[in-house]
Image (spheres, rainbow, N blue to C red):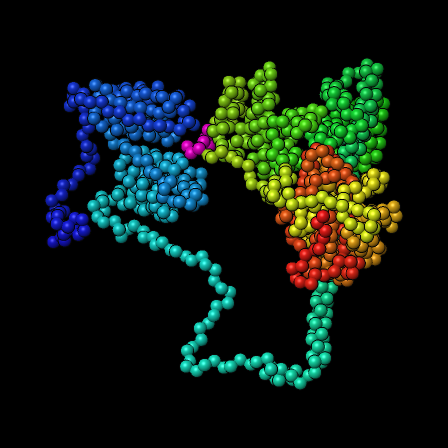
Amino acid sequence: MDFPVNKGKQKGKKAVNPEELLEVPDGWKEPGISKEQNPHGMVSESSFATLFPKYREAYINECWPLVKKTLADHNIKAELDLVEGSMTVRTTKKTWDPYIIVKARDLLKLLARSVPYEQAVRVLEDETACDIIKIGSLTRNKERFVKRRQRLIGPNGSTLKAIEILTDCYVLVQGNTVSALGPYKGLREVRKIVEDTMKNIHPIYNIKTLMIKKELAKDPELRNENWERFLPKFKSKNISKRKQPKKKKIKKPYTPFPPPQPESKVDKELASGEYFLKPHQKKAKIQQEKKEKQLKAVQKSQEKRAKAFVAPKEESAPPKKKQRVTEDVNVEELKKKIKKSQVSIVLSVVYCDLFSALCKLQDLLREEEKLQLSLVRYIRSVEESGQDIPEEITRFFESLKTKRQNIGDGTRYIEHPVNDFHLLYRFVVDWQSMFNNIWCQDCEETEAAKDFNFTVQLVSKRLGLWPSTYDLEGASNALLRLWRVYKLDLDDFIDGRILNYTADQPLSTEEVLAVTSYADATKDDYSEMKWLEALYRRLTTQGGKANNTPEVVRVGRKLAASYYKSGFPKKAILTLEPFQSLGNRGINRDVAFYQSSVSTTDRAPVTAPPPKDPVYEALCRENQKTPLEMSKLRCFLRKTAIPYYRAKEEVANYEPRISLFHDVISPSLIDLLKSVASKGFSRSTVFLEESGPNGEVTYGKLDNVRISQTSWIGTDEYPQLTKLENTIKLITGLSAEYRTFRSHSEKFQVLNYGVGGMYTVHYDYMNYMVGVPSNPSDSEDIRTSGDRVATWMFYLNDVKAGGATVFPEAKARVPVVKGGAAFWYNVKLNGAVDPRTLHGGCPVLVGSKWVSNKWIREEGQMARRLCGLTEDAVEDLPTS
């Protein structure tokens, strides 16, 4: 059989006859070198040095004695320089194996690339080698590189494990390199799999091929045959991701004749007879067609709205099961149930949230003083009767007395969010625990307990509600929001320090754990981990505090669990290491569990999740306009309809025009709005149109994007507020008159923001038309008043920090100034809505925020705000 001569670079060489090749017998191994073959050692010295990263310093320093001992057996000297961060190996005069220095160099390379010592030391064996595969330059796109590298590892490392089993190699994926350790044949397969994976060939293809080859090698008959016919052949498919057009053009058959001439406008009018109509008849026909089209649209919208008033089909109630009446009655159990129900009456009050309005928290603080006085009377009565007071009640009373000694009237106390959290936590947790101690099932019903119960009943009735876990969760969310939006120093924040304002008490360990529990419940792993880190740092750095107290151990275990949940089992193990000497079974069990989940790959450091609206949060922290843009803004006295009255206008933005008018509301009217609104507050809702479970349309929704409470006040009930409507009309030229039908404006909306209260970015316009009924939830006075043309917002008090009104699209920021008012148009001169008026209320950092909105409707503005002559016309407003 003739064999052709090789082409290309091998041209000119003789062909090789396969029959002349030697066959390697099974089990043959290459003979090694012994000391007897080189008794005189090496003539010259050889050395290799390798750098290692900083994070490997601790591990290498720990295992270096083992490295030196292992290399000393081969007469290789090893040195470690922690200052330079390098490892060096060199031969000695006693070294008899000339290749061992290369093996020692490979050992250092593997140790520097995070390979454990137990695996790396195998490279010194004769049949074992290593291969460092650089994958960083195989893919330029970073995201694509990370995905393909993760594909090589597989879910829970399953793909990497399969590769190790099939190639008999140890494989470690670390950063931009892949370290492989094993026999030469296996290393060749590993390199092929890694390079193919980075070329977007899934490793499962190569794994399948290796599995087939492994099975074929077991058959002695097939061992020396060609296996190509057994191996799968995978074809790469480049599927185009280009979007296909919805309507595909069908190619018409070719014809030598030109296409028919299309009909002109005159031909169409002649065919329909419209050509012979007079101009006024044509105009009347067009108007008639428009009316018919509008009538169909109105009928369609009326049918849609009428569906909301169709009563749903009621299903018949299932028959009630008759309860069996037993003659045997346990009197003692019945007494306990009655007593328990009487206690629950105290706490089962009307459900409503308190955290969304600081004015309600101030009432809660005032009522807590009455509970404190009643508790003093209860303790004195119990002591006079000679009975023992439970230790929990005494401890709570002393703690309460310490926390309330510097409160005063409560205004300053309530303005700090940490103090608000203290108050809600006391009512939800501490007072509840104290109630359970006084009214336990086995406790005697004394006169002191009855008197205290009566006070609690009065407080509950006066408040009309009792704080619940919903309030505590809302306050926890507020603290997380303030820390995230304003980028506060977490250690200072937990200690109650915000800018120049300090809370009466720092957050306790239990209070911080309540915040982290909320973060855990809402899947906010990053916040949970950071808050636990700050708490653990505070506990372990307090003066004289032992690191093995039950409190520190508890927080440490929670922090370790948070690390594990975030994908950092190594950090979890390091956190629990100081507590392993305590002999706690739970801690040892946790460490063992985390060790079983440790991966050889180091995770990247965790970073904060990106904000939902970065521009909004940046504006909340500070102004984002450039110095040049700020220099163009002006403050001036704006002319009004009364020649001798000028309005103090501060321009915050020109396009669109956003202004702040100073001193436009008197202190007496501010007090009137506050006092009236406080009596009728309810949780603020977000306007959303949704479908109910039975298909009905519902409007308005409670949502965490708006933390405040609202009250509506009209001039029909309080005529004194007509002065404010006249002020708006005088400055803006728009009619702000409130009417009971087709009103020119809405009632005054008064809002009080709660703990960390805010309103995320939103629009004020609603795309309503004048004369067309809006959603059924609107009152009759504004249902046909059209869209919100403009917004006028009074600021009823000063805020110490935060709470500004920001416009992300315009990069404008309006601070809160008592007695001032912000004003902007929501609709352009051409009648289209202006999306640049997207705005939001920043979270209140320190202080209380009161505002009052006056939305001016389209009704009544026809002759006051004329349409522009062109589509892109802008407001002709004064600039100085």
Q: Position of residue 234 (x, y in %)?
A: 34, 52
Along the horizontal axis of the image, is 47 left or right of 139?
left
Q: Position of residue 785 (x, y in %)?
A: 78, 58
**Is residue 598 shown in magenta?**
yes
Residue 544 in which image quadrant: top right
Residue 154 in which image quadrant: top left
For the point 39% across and 35% down, which residue is it? 174
For the point 32% across and 46% down, which residue is it? 209
Residue 874 in which image quadrant: bottom right
Q: Nearer the viewer, residue 398 or 228?
A: 398
**Is residue 592 shown in magenta?**
no
Along the horizontal axis of the image, is 841 left or right of 681?
left
For the point 56% across and 35% down, which residue is it? 526
Residue 333 visible from this viewpoint: no
Q: Position of residue 504 (x, y in %)?
A: 71, 24
Along the horizontal axis of the image, is 28 left or right of 435?
left
Tell me if residue 559 comes above or below residue 736 in the rendering: above
For the point 21% across and 26% down, which residue is it? 98
Q: Position of residue 244 (x, y in %)?
A: 47, 62
Majority secondary structure of the magenta segment? Answer: loop
Residue 133 visible from this viewpoint: yes
Q: Nearer the viewer, residue 436 or 551?
A: 551
Q: Which stretch appears magenta?
A: 595-602
Tell me if residue 388 comes above or below residue 101 in the rendering: above
Q: Nearer the viewer, residue 544 or 717?
A: 717
